[in-house]
């Protein structure tokens, strides 16, 4: 994949959006690859089990937070690898917001640096906030 | 049903949902939750978790195609994302406190409303060239390419649009959908942003909004990897293909058919919600 990086001087909106588009695509493809990998491990081991999602039990605590997911990945648990892929997917738009903060900073649009940081704070609260302990 | 068969059927269904969602511009998210809940008898909470993650895949996947068109406005997107992400967290927190039957009923009405928007004739867009002071202060004015060259636009009724966006974010977090319909309504009808700019900017915002509620859902155990895997891969691939095949040719008859499907699903969600079966 070719990255059309603009020269430092022309950080105009159009070139920023082009980079963002590519960033999002890379994020989606990367996370999809991890999900596929985990999915294969999961199906090979559990493909014959009877599927039952009719009652809500909530995921195991090991699949709800970063530590648990990383530990599961180190044991090559299919479900944990899929969950890692989903984490990467969730991180993709967050990466876009971080990139925007830099871009607005280079454009010297400080009002939008502030707006972007507010969005980033809300996202951080959601993903790493009090609900993940 | 074995996990292997279940996964295969789910991937196919999600692929179709993502494909049709991209072709009609309605987004695949609106049919994935009813598909999981009504057809596959998946608990609403798991269905919403899987759908929400797939929404991130479909919006990010389609973004590359939209960006090339050069219509989206980053500043409008970022400014309104303050409202949608706050709304998304609120919605996700509400979802963990109300019954699944209530969520099903709300979902049904949102489906009916989306269908109405998709089949209703496009209202004539009043050209409003009056400058808006707040729009200038917030650097929201922009230009977009038309057949007559670059055309300037300004953004109106910003507080109203911001409020509607908070509502769109809440619905997204509560129901696990992108709520593109509400977002376009807020930008198109309230803020008078040109249609092409509002649809592409809305697509950009959907991923960030969904990421805000996904964190809450993950921590509450709503996101099941075995279920989300086929849904995310299917819907993501479907929407990428849909966006590639026909970015502009949103054929009217297809919208009508998809709209009719959504009406049926909406009625069924409401019925099942009231009878307590979801």
Image (cartoon, helix red, strand yellow):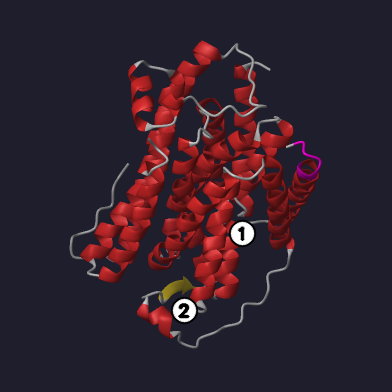
Q: Which residue is mark 2?
A: B153
User: Along the polypeptide, which appears first: circle 1 or circle 2?
Assistant: 2
Disc marking residue B181:
1
Q: Quadrant of residue B97?
A: top right
- Front residue of B185 and B240: B185
Q: Nearer the viewer, residue B248 or B177?
A: B177
Q: Separation of disc 1 and disc 2 at Cα?
A: 21 Å
Q: Is residue B253 above or below residue B12?
A: below
Please give the label number shown on residue B106: none
Q: Which residue extends farthest left? A: A8
Residue B198 spot, x, y in % from top left: 52, 66
Q: Is residue A90 above or below residue A65?
A: below
Q: Position of residue B102 (x, y in %)?
A: 70, 47
- Based on the picture, tell me whether residue B276 belongs to the magenta stretch: yes
Q: Is residue B22 left or right of residue A26?
A: right
The spot of residue B27 in percent (x, y) is 59, 50
Q: Residue at x 50, y 86 (%)?
A: B129
């Amino acid at each position: 994949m070719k990255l059309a990086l603009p020269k430092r001087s022309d950080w105009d909106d159009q070139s920023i959006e082009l980079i963002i588009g590519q960033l999002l695509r890379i994020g989606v493809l990367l996370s999809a690859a991890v999900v596929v990998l985990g999915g294969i491990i999961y199906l090979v081991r559990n493909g014959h089990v009877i599927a039952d999602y009719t009652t809500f039990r909530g995921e195991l605590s090991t699949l709800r937070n970063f530590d648990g997911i990383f530990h599961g990945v180190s044991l090559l648990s299919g479900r944990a690898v899929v969950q890692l892929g989903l984490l990467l997917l969730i991180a993709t738009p967050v990466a876009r917001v971080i990139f925007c903060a830099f871009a607005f900073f280079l454009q010297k649009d400080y009002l939008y640096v502030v707006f972007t940081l507010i969005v980033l704070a809300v996202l951080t609260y959601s993903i790493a906030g009090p609900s993940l302990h | 049903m074995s996990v292997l068969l279940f996964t295969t059927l789910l991937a196919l269904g999600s692929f179709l949902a993502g494909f049709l969602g991209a072709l009609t511009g309605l987004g695949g998210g609106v049919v994935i939750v009813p598909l999981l809940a009504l057809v596959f008898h998946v608990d609403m909470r798991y269905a919403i978790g899987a759908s929400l993650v797939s929404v991130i895949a479909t919006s990010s996947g389609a973004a590359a195609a939209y960006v090339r068109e050069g219509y989206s406005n980053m500043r409008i997107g970022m400014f309104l994302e303050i409202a949608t992400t706050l709304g998304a967290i609120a919605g996700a927190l509400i979802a963990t406190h109300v019954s699944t039957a209530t969520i099903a009923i709300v979902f049904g009405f949102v489906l009916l409303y989306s269908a109405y928007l998709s089949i209703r004739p496009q209202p004539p867009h009043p050209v409003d060239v009056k400058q808006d002071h707040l729009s200038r202060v917030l650097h929201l004015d922009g230009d977009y390419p038309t057949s007559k060259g670059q055309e300037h636009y300004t953004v109106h009724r910003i507080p109203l649009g911001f409020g509607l966006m908070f509502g769109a974010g809440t619905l997204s977090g509560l129901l696990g959908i992108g709520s593109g319909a509400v977002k376009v309504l807020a930008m198109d009808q309230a803020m008078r942003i040109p249609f092409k700019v509002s649809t592409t900017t809305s697509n950009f915002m959907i991923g960030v909004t969904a990421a805000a509620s996904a964190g809450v859902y993950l921590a509450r155990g709503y996101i099941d990897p075995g279920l989300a895997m086929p849904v995310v891969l299917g819907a993501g691939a479907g929407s990428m293909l849909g966006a590639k095949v026909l970015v502009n040719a949103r054929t009217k008859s297809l919208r009508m058919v998809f709209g009719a499907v959504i009406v049926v699903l909406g009625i069924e969600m409401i019925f099942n919600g009231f009878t307590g079966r979801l």
